[in-house]
Amino acid sequence: MRKGLRLGFRCSCPGAPGLEVSADTRADLARDLRCPACQAERKLHLDRVTAEGGLIGCLACGHPELYTRKSFPPAAGILVVVAAAALAPFTHYVSLATAALVDLALFRWVPDVVVCYVCRAEHRGFTSQPRHPRFDREIEERLLYGPRAVMGRPMREGGTAGAPDPEH
C-alpha cells in the first residue's frame, strides 16, 4: 500500500480521466495540475491543509464541507454478504457468521478516506484532526438544492471540520 498524501478527483470536462496528486509530505504537494483531456490548469487549494496535516476543506475545489467514509468499495462488501447467504444452507449458516467477522475485520483495518460533498474528491493519508463526520444526507441536499432544500437548520459555519456525526 502506498504511504503519503493522496488526492484523487475528476476534471469537469467530458470524458476526463481521474486525476491523482500524491506526495510524501504537505510541503511536497503540487500547487497546480493540468488535465490531460482538456489541458485546463487546475490550482489546488493548499490553504485547506492545516499545519498539522489535517484538512479544513477540499484541496480540489476548496469547499469546506467534507465527510469521512471507509476506503472500501461498497460493492465488494455486498459481494461478501451475497456469497455468504448463497453458501448458508450448505455450511449450516456458518458462512453468515464468517461474513460478519470479515466485515468487522474490514471495518477495523481499512483506512478512512475524506470525501468532498461538492466535487467528490478523495483525500487519503491526511491526519484525522480536525475530524470530519460521516456522510450526512442533510448537507448533501442543501448543497444540491440550495434554498429549495426542505431542511430547517442552517449550514455550519466553517464547514464540517470538528463537527459531530449526524444523528440519523
Image: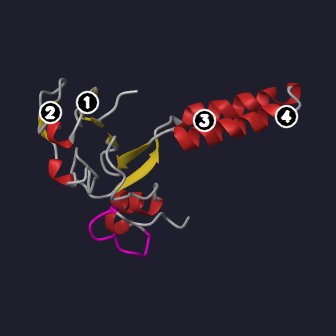
- Give how far across and how far down residue 38 sits, in percent: 15, 27
Q: Which amino acid, by three-letter code, is at mark 3?
A: Gly
Magenta region includes residue 20? no
Q: Which residues are magenta?
A: 150-161
Q: CA distance from mark 4 to mark 1?
A: 43 Å
State the residue at coordinates (37%, 63%).
Answer: 142
Q: Which mark is residue 93?
A: 4
Query: According to the image, label 2 marks what residue?
Result: 33
Q: Quadrant of the N terminus?
A: top left
Q: Amino acid at mark 4?
A: Tyr
The mark nearer the N terminus, 3 or 1, is 1
Q: Residues within 10 Å of mark 3 (few under 14, many from 20)?
A: some
- Which residue lies under the disc numbered 3? 77
Q: Residue at x 77, y 38 (%)?
A: 97
Secondary structure mostly seen in the magenta stretch: loop
| Image marks 2 and 1: residues in contact by CB distance under 8 Å | yes
Q: Which residue is mark 1?
A: 19
The answer to whether residue 152 is magenta is yes
Of the numbered discs 2 and 4, the one sitting upstream in the chain is 2
Q: Quadrant for residue 19, please give it.
A: top left
Task: Establish if 58 lies above or below 168.
Answer: above
What distance separates the C-alpha of mark 3 from that of mark 1? 26 Å
Q: Earlier in the sequence, mark 2 or mark 1?
A: 1
Instruction: Classify residue 108 by image quadrant.
Output: top right
Question: The residue tagged with tag 4: helix, strand or loop?
Answer: loop
Of callouts 4 and 1, which one flags the residue occurring earlier in the amino acid sequence? 1
